[in-house]
Amino acid sequence: MLLHRQPDLTVVMDNVNKAHNLSAIIRSCDGVGVGEIHAVSYRKSIYTEQKAAAGASKWVTMNMYPDIETVYRKLSEKGMQILVATNREGCRDFRSVDYTIPTALVVGAEWDGISEEAIKGANHAIMVPMLGMGESLNVSVATAVILFEAQRQRGEKGIYSKPRLDQECFERMLFEFAYPRLSKELREKGAPYPPLDEQGGLFDYSPLRSQLMPARSC
């Protein structure tokens, strides 16, 4: 999983608040190698739903923000193109965009859609063409459709064929995913992670066991 992570591909959820949509978007992100996503909330109820979704996600990190400007500033500093998914007139077909460059996909709330602030700060507005009576897809479905187009383009260019994470980040995440309870204990104590062998196993766990686990009385 870590060998296919795409640190320069991400999703921004602009006030998406329904639990099933949040979960579906996170699952799609994991499926295409997105390991870090972002969520903006302007109401306490939305924040609560997003926080619950973030806590339930084991494989994808979700960062939360009070406004879209903060997220855009962070993404721009990383050199990412920002794409907003909407169905307004004049939008580009989502398949005409180059996703092999650093990209952030912004999707909007279920009822209100994408915010004006999100649209104004983006590089491009894209849409999934609709041929029926419905004006747009469900937000989680639209996100999945666009993300898998990004995966297709990146796959054709061989971007998934080599690790994208730097070595330090790769080793840290490998340890935390392989040993979640132990890594939590080490972080709480401010202790460094021990090295792993080539199979991702601990070389010697016994010193850590005696250091971290409190002695029990008879």
Image (spheres, grey):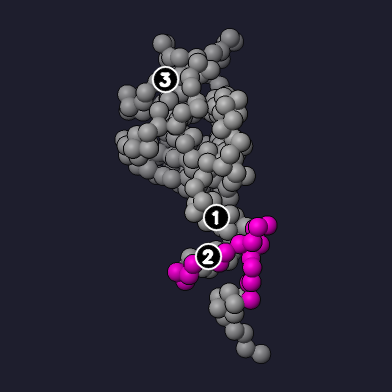
- Residue 191: percent from the left, percent from the top? 48, 70
Q: Position of residue 83 (x, y in %)?
A: 43, 25
Q: Determine if residue 106 is in view.
A: yes
- Could you say which disc has been placed on residue 171 in the image? 1
Which amino acid does the dot numbered 2 rest on?
A: Tyr
Q: Which residue range is magenta in the image?
A: 189-206
Counting other residues with Cα less than 10 Å from the Cα at mark 1, is it few (<14), some (14-19), or many (20 or more)?
some
Along the viewing direction, whichever of 89 and 192 lies nearer the viewer: 192
Q: Is residue 142 among what the camera can see? A: no
First of labels 3, 2 by sequence position:
3
Crowd tier of the residue under label 2, counting other residues whose Cα lies within 10 Å: few below 14, some 14–19, many 20 or above: some
Q: CA gap, disc 3 to disc 2?
A: 43 Å
Residue located at (59% from left, 46% from top): 2
The kind of secondary structure element at disc 2 is: loop
Q: Nearer the viewer, residue 196 or 128?
A: 196
Which label belongs to residue 60? Answer: none
Q: From the viewer's perspective, is residue 168 above or below residue 185?
A: above
- Pointer 2 with pointer 1, Cβ within 8 A: yes
Tell me if residue 154 comes above or below residue 125 in the rendering: below
Q: Is residue 168 magenta?
A: no
Inter-mark Cα distance, 2 to 1: 9 Å
Q: Which residue is mark 2?
A: 193
Residue 41: percent from left, percent from top = 40, 39
Q: Does 196 lie within the magenta span?
A: yes
Q: Amino acid under label 3?
A: Ala
Q: Earlier in the sequence, mark 3 or mark 1?
A: 3
The residues bearing labels 3 and 1 have C-alpha atoms spaced at a distance of 37 Å
> Could you tell me if the residues under marks 3 and 1 are in contact, i.e. CB atoms within 8 Å?
no
Tell me, for residue 125, which label it has, or none.
3
Q: Quadrant of residue 163?
A: top right
